[in-house]
Image (cartoon, grey):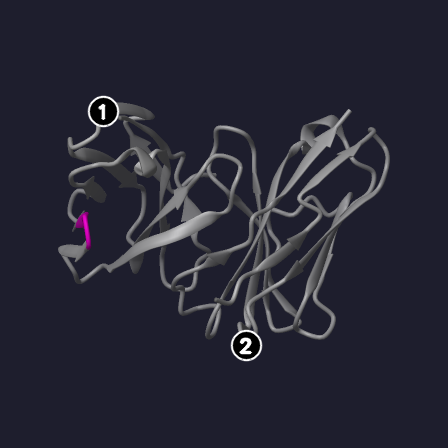
């Protein structure tokens, strides 16, 4: 079963534009993570936000967390063609396993 | 830079044959995970180890899948017999610390299985 549901499923933008992906989850969580996956490759960790945090930044990435709405968003600013990948949110509650969402496929056109 | 090693990268097999995947986590990482990712979906946890002990294998189809981490270092995931529905990417990941302190996971490049 999937804990998170990403929205949209697919997103196409031009280089330089911002990309926003949303993740909704079902239960209370301890932390939420975002991962990136290039086609046919493994996942790479981008950022972790804890349940007591509301916003976190890492380079061109901005993640927000709204525990009241059980949702998170990932913003990639000034996107580049190299940002083309699938992006997954993953959430865990206490000692429960980390459960991944269904992913957003981002295509950035030069 | 330390990496999670997986082999083979690609495996094609016929239905009813046995397959095995190997994973060597980052040195010192106590927690090791095997995920299965069907094309177009997110990874689904199959089994999680803390050192050599299984802490979660609730989603592992135990009639045909087995996993071991005998010395608490590298791990093997086996499927016998393989079925058409097992075609997927099998991802290994590791993390520092105890399994209940869920932090960043480091993934290998995965093993792509095709069952004909």
Q: Which residue is drawn at 61% across and 58% down?
A: B5
A89 vs B15, left or right, is: left
B34 left or right of B8?
left
Left or right, B71 with reference to B2: right
Quadrant of the rendering where the C terminus of chain B is positioned: top right
The chain that hosts pointer 2 is: B
Query: Is residue A75 or residue A81 the one in the foreground?
Result: A81
Q: Mark 2 points at which residue?
A: B28
Instruction: Provide the residue span drawn in magenta.
Output: A59-64
* Crowdedness near tag 2: few (<14), some (14–19) or many (≥20) residues, C-alpha within 10 Å: few
Name the quadrant containing residue A6: top left
The residue identified by callout 1 is A13
Residue B24, disc: none
Q: Where is residue B112 in the image (x, y as percent from the top left)?
A: 65, 38
Write down the chain letter for disc 1: A
Residue A18 higher or lower than B53, as above or below: above
Name the side, left or right, on which B102 lies relative to B52.
left
For this orientation, the residue located farthest to the right is: B17
Percent of width and height locating residue A22: 24, 36
Q: Disc 2 and disc 1: Cα gap in Å? A: 41 Å
């Amino acid at each position: 079963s999937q804990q998170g549901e990403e929205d949209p499923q697919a997103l196409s933008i031009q280089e330089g534009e911002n990309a926003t992906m949303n993740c909704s989850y079902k239960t209370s969580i301890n932390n939420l993570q975002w991962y990136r996956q290039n086609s046919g490759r493994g996942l790479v960790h981008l950022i972790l936000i804890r349940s007591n945090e509301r916003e976190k930044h890492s380079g061109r990435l901005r993640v927000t967390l709204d525990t009241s709405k059980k949702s998170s968003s990932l913003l990639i600013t000034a996107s580049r063609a190299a940002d083309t990948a699938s992006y997954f949110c993953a959430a865990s509650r206490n000692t429960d396993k980390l459960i991944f969402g269904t992913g957003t496929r981002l295509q950035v056109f030069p | 830079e330390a990496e999670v090693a997986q082999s083979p990268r690609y495996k094609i097999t016929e239905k009813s044959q046995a397959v095995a995947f190997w994973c060597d986590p980052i040195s010192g990482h106590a927690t090791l995970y095997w995920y299965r990712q069907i094309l177009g979906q997110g990874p689904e946890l199959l089994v999680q180890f803390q050192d050599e002990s299984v802490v979660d294998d609730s989603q592992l189809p135990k009639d045909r899948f087995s996993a071991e981490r005998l010395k608490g270092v590298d791990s093997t995931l086996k499927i016998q017999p393989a079925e058409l529905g097992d075609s997927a990417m099998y991802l290994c990941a590791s993390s520092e610390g105890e399994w209940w302190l869920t932090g960043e996971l480091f993934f290998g490049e995965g093993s792509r299985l095709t069952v004909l």
